[in-house]
């Protein structure tokens, strides 16, 4: 019978990159979410003993055969108050959360050669775990409405951004958490209001949980982007704007949730110039 010591040794032979690849290679959506939570627990339970390791993550993670992926312009409108209409809207969020699980673990596995502090990996493991929780909460809510993941079409915009920034850590941080995930801070409050008007408090509560956590995720992206810029003697705001112009097509789209973005370490003098709107001076001190 294995002793506790031998079990600890066996666990320590698995490194964090191995765990990340196990999530990225799981092609079943619910399984990916479960594996993400399990990997996060193993990392925490190692008490700092687990090695980071090295990995070559795939350009595209394994995914289920459904949903049908369409260009964003061809996505159907999500209107009405029927169970199907609500499920369609929640499914769109759920698809983003599945992408976000893979984005977090890809961040863990892809940039292991950058001599990053262990806290970097702690943060992105936490993100991967929380995104998995969001996916599961949405799965449960969709089941309440009589639907499941894959029942509606979705788009592939998030992973296209991941592909475009796969060789550049700063660009990945600038575009994925600080542009695409920050967009969630802008649109989720309106969704909460919409479901509230329908009397759908269960969906409201799920979306409130997601919004609260996503502020933290954008903050993690901002913190490590600023770490990278400080380490390389770069102006964070100027470098962020340069990378967004290079890797993100078009203007950033208002309206913006300025308060949530400020809390997340993304003041409006960063993004307003890229939206075509004049930048108002931020009056709050930033902590990174």
Image (spheres, helix red, strand yellow):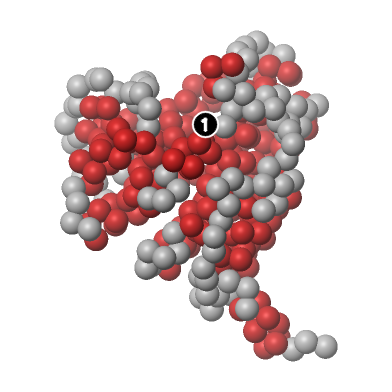
Foreground: 276 or 40?
A: 276
Q: Is residue 173 left or right of residue 35?
A: left
Looking at the image, is 18 positioned above or below residue 259? below
Please report the residue visible at 29 percent of the width from the left and 56 percent of the height from the top.
228
Measured as percent of width and height from the top left, residue 247 is found at 36, 36
Confirm whether residue 56 shows in the render. Answer: yes
Q: Is residue 156 left or right of residue 146?
A: left
Q: Is residue 102 above or below residue 74?
A: below
Which residue is rendered at x = 62% and y = 63% of the image?
Answer: 19
Residue named by callout 1? 157
Image quadrant for the N terminus? bottom right
On screen, 259 above or below 152? Answer: below
Residue 58: give x, y in percent of width and height: 58, 52
Where residue 141 appears, as percent x and y from the top left, is 71, 33
Nearer the observer, 164 or 67 = 164
Question: Which residue is rendered at x = 16% and y = 31% of the image?
Answer: 281
Secondary structure under tag 1 reads helix
Q: Mark 1, residues whose alpha carbon is within 10 Å: few (<14), some, or many (≥20)?
A: some
User: Taking 48 as reference, is 12 left or right?
Assistant: right
């Amino acid at each position: 019978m294995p002793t506790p010591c031998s079990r600890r040794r066996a666990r320590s032979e698995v490194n964090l990159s191995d765990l990340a690849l196990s999530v990225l290679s799981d092609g079943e959506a619910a399984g990916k979410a479960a594996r993400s939570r399990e990997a996060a627990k193993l990392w925490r339970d190692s008490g700092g003993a687990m090695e980071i390791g090295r990995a070559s993550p795939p350009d595209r993670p394994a995914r289920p055969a459904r949903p049908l992926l369409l260009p964003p312009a061809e996505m159907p409108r999500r209107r009405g108050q029927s169970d199907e209409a609500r499920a369609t809207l929640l499914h769109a969020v759920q698809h983003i959360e599945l992408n976000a699980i893979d984005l977090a673990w890809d961040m863990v596995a892809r940039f292991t050669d950058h001599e990053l502090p262990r806290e970097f990996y702690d943060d992105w493991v936490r993100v991967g775990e929380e995104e998995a929780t969001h996916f599961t909460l949405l799965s449960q809510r969709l089941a309440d409405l009589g639907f499941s993941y894959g029942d509606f079409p979705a788009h592939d915009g998030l992973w296209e951004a991941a592909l475009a920034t796969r060789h550049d850590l700063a660009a990945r941080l600038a575009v994925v958490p600080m542009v695409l995930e920050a967009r969630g801070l802008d649109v989720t409050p309106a969704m909460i209001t919409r479901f509230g008007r329908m009397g759908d408090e269960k969906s409201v509560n799920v979306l409130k949980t997601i919004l609260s956590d996503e502020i933290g995720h954008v903050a993690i992206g901002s913190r490590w982007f600023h770490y990278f810029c400080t380490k390389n003697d770069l102006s964070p705001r100027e470098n962020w704007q340069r990378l967004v112009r290079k890797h993100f097509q078009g203007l950033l789209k208002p309206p913006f949730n300025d308060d949530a973005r400020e809390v997340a370490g993304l003041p409006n003098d960063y993004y307003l110039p890229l939206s075509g709107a004049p930048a108002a001076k931020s009056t709050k001190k930033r902590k990174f």
